[in-house]
Image (spheres, helix red, strand yellow):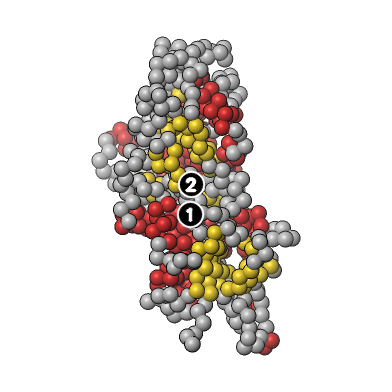
Amino acid sequence: MGAKKPRVVIVGAGMAGITAANRLYVASEGRFEVVVVEGGMRIGGRINTCEFGGDRVEMGATWIHGVGGSPVYEIATRVQALSSEQPWECMDGMLEVSRTVAEDGSEVDPAVSERVSALFKSLMDFAQGKAKAVGDGGRSGSGHREVEEEERLHEVAAEALEVCKGESGGMKNLSIGSFLRKGLEIYWERNGYGKNWRRKLDEEAVFAMHENTQRICTSADDLSTLDFSAESEYVMCSGREITIAKGYSSIIESLTSVLPSGTIRLGWEVVKIDWRPVEDVSEIGHADPLPVTLHFRDGAKISADHVVLTVSLGVLKARVDRDSGLFAPPLPSFKTDSISRLGFGVVNKLFLQLPATNDRTDFPVLQLAFHRTDSGFKNEGVPWWMRRTASLAPIHRSSHVLLSWFAGKEALHLETLTDEEIMEGVSSTVDSMLPSPSGSVSRNGKLNPKKLPNGSQGGSAKFEKVLRSKWGSDPLFLGSYSYVAVGSSVDDVDALAEPLPRATEATRCVRHPLQILFAGEATHRTHYSTTHGAYFSGIREANRLLQHYYYSK
């Protein structure tokens, strides 16, 4: 008889779990017994490709965030997933902005939008360590005026950082939100906008629009909870950002295709993981059982030499502090502390289908710049949950499907609404904010009828169907992706990724190392919140086991 294969149970059939299974099976040439257990009834995790309105759309992961160095792009290229006869979401890339509409229905002066956008980008570049120092002559290709403006914006960012450091007592408690707002204040002071209240109001609305986009990018409900220092440690893949013509699910399907039949078990929801944090070698006999036991919702059990846990940070947050938590015994404090400190937010996508009987392919790309609610320009036609979405736009140039993104409290509330309530709320927003033909807008809170893209008057922005994601209320995810919150750091990401039992002097005699390994986007120090970060984490944990058994080449 051959030697018994080490049994590895992978919890979760998302990008990290499927990648780990693929790597273990292929690289070891089948010398592991690999089982993937998935609590839901589909593979993919936070990747979920669907069809809506005749187009292919993504309910979760959408973009390849930079093609340079991205394993997702490499797989998509290899399996020829980057072209399709069926139209797909963002097949034209990000459509150019045609209108930035303010709270009162007026169109924001493009010069104002460009100026504020440049400020916001400069502040974020500075926070991410991408801005050049003042006086650096390396800005080739820029005209003299452009260089001067870049340097002025850089000076604003540098001053904002120094002021914020003084106010927060250093870098430890400094947030992206406070830095951005301080930058806007300093920008106003330097440009003397205090007396031009209308221009200032529009600039603040456009700035808030960019903040809302940043909320979606990071999943932070409030940017005041987003750690400043972590921004410069986050690594972006280079090159253009694209979507996948045949859907993100094609990547998961490719990785899964090499696994033996029966490897993945759907509907197996883990309710408890028994493990051995400390062992006395002298009391362990030769018939020592496998060290980890997984208990499932239906009462079944599986024992394993190693478990690769890829559940979301949201699930970990919900399951580690309870008396009847996921782990027995409970996780050590270095794990629970990091889980508690790191951020995990909710981002949802809303798709709306325009009537197919009407030619609505000319629906504009709208950027929505909402004024402060105390500004006197609050639009009563806009429901509160729409006020922090940044855009509403067709998913490609000829599509009858519109897309809007939501984060935080608004994203959670979106999950509770009926389809009818959603269509009514979005219709009311569009009808009241699109400019009238004359461009005139009532200043008394009663807006004039608006001319819509099909030539009809206000009240006619109707939709046929709605499709939205519900990541926040899904018990298998409880949110969308992670971020480094104020009070945490990327060191907490590393702590979350560390296997158990912990490799310390006190545990050198442990008979069963690497009992629980942690993977998933939240465990990757420089690529958290992304599918390629999840991929890299799955490779990392698979390689850890391959090296442990000397199977790696």
At 42% from the left and 78% from the top, the residue drawn is: 551
Say which of 390 and 227 sits in front: 390
List x then y, in percent, for residue 450.
46, 15
Q: Evaluate whether residue 175 shows in this view.
A: no
Per the rendering, the mark at residue 44 is 1
Say which of 449 and 249 sits in front: 249
Label 1 neighbourhood size at 10 Å, few (<14), some (14-19), many (20+)?
A: many
Label 1 SS: loop
Residue under pointer 2: 60
At 69% from the left and 60% from the top, the residue drawn is: 325
Is 380 located above or below residue 284 in the figure? Answer: above
At 44% from the left and 80% from the top, the residue drawn is: 550
Per the rendering, the mark at residue 388 is none
Using the rendered view, name the quadrant where residue 276 is placed. Answer: bottom right
Alpha carbon distance from label 1 to label 2: 10 Å
Q: Amino acid at mark 1?
A: Gly
Q: Nearer the viewer, mark 1 or mark 2?
A: 1
At 47% from the left and 48% from the top, the residue drawn is: 48
List x then y, in percent, for residue 235.
42, 54
Is 137 located above or below residue 107 in the figure? Answer: below
Q: Amino acid at mark 2?
A: Gly
Pointer 1 and pointer 2: residues touching (CB < 8 Å)?
A: yes
